[in-house]
Amino acid sequence: MGTALIFICIILVASVLQTSTGFGFSIMATPFLLLLFQPQEAIQINIILSLIISISLIWKIRTDIDFILLKRFTLTSIVGVSFGIIFFISINISIFKLVVSILLLILTMLLMCNFKVEPTKFRDYIVGGLSGLLTTSIGMPGPPLLLYFTGTDTEKGKLRATTLTFYLWIYFISLITQIIFTGTNKIIWESSLYAIPIVFLGLFIGQVLFKWLNQRIFRLFTYIILSCTGIFLLIESLSSL
């Protein structure tokens, strides 16, 4: 019962953040799902539920999508997905968690130091490739996108819409790649099925929050989510080494 309650809380909070910010689900859910499931299970549950969220929101956010940027991300993400699955298959669980935690903390520090970058076509392609790599390797395409969008001062509506639309593509390809190379199991699909009502509750709450979430509060949410998740996972991963 305790495990089920923790699972519900993780999915609810992550769904609210995903809907209100456009990036929160994988960044919030994956580290904590790793405490309840094996890496393969945690990543595939995250991918399945993220796909459901993106499909549910795509019609409402379609007018804010940057299609040129989306095309660039999509093209190079295919290469990243291929390298990511190799990384996932070869890495050990303790190192896996440590990599995720360090990645989140570095990202948080860069954002808090007011990291800035000029958007270019080349950088768009690089971000897409990194995002693809991180999706199949650790189930988290969000960090490169978040850093890039925040560093270029992208408006929150455009950030949310373009990110969620990109997730439709990258999560679908990553799920197929994961299943082909690592397989799947009953626990993954049953857990995902049970989580669907919680996801839709989170979508509703997140839509309400998005209406009053200004850019300053948006950034504050970003720092809190990334730092707390990174520190928690770092402590947990170091204790298991």
Image (cartoon, rainbow, N blue to C red):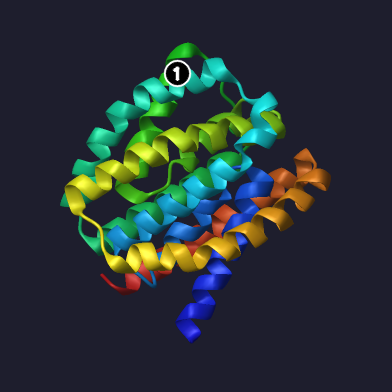
Q: Is residue 56 positioned above or below 41 on the image?
A: above
Residue that appears at 34% across and 50% down: 138
Q: Is residue 109 positioned above or below 8 on the image?
A: above
Whether residue 42 is visible: yes
Residue that appears at 48% across and 41% down: 143
Residue reaching furthest bottom?
1
Instruction: Locate residue 154, reporting x and y percent.
Output: 66, 27
- Image position of 99 (left or right of 119): left
SS for callout 1: helix
Nearer to the camera, 74 or 119: 74
Residue reaching furthest top?
121
Residue that appears at 51% across and 23% down: 70
- Image position of 33 (left or right of 61): left
Residue type indicated by callout 1: Arg
Instruction: Locate residue 213, reporting x and y percent.
Output: 78, 46
Crowding around mark 1 (Cα neighbors within 10 Å: few <14, some 14 to 19, many 20+) is: some
- Image position of 198 (left or right of 32): right
Q: Is residue 3 positioned above or below 61 on the image?
A: below
- Which residue position is annotated with label 1? 72
Nearer to the camera, 52 or 66: 52
Residue reaching furthest right?
212
Quadrant of the rendered structure where residue 67 is?
A: top right
Instruction: Locate residue 189, reporting x and y percent.
Output: 36, 62
Whether residue 154 is visible: no
Image quadrant for the C terminus? bottom left
Q: Number of callouts in the render?
A: 1
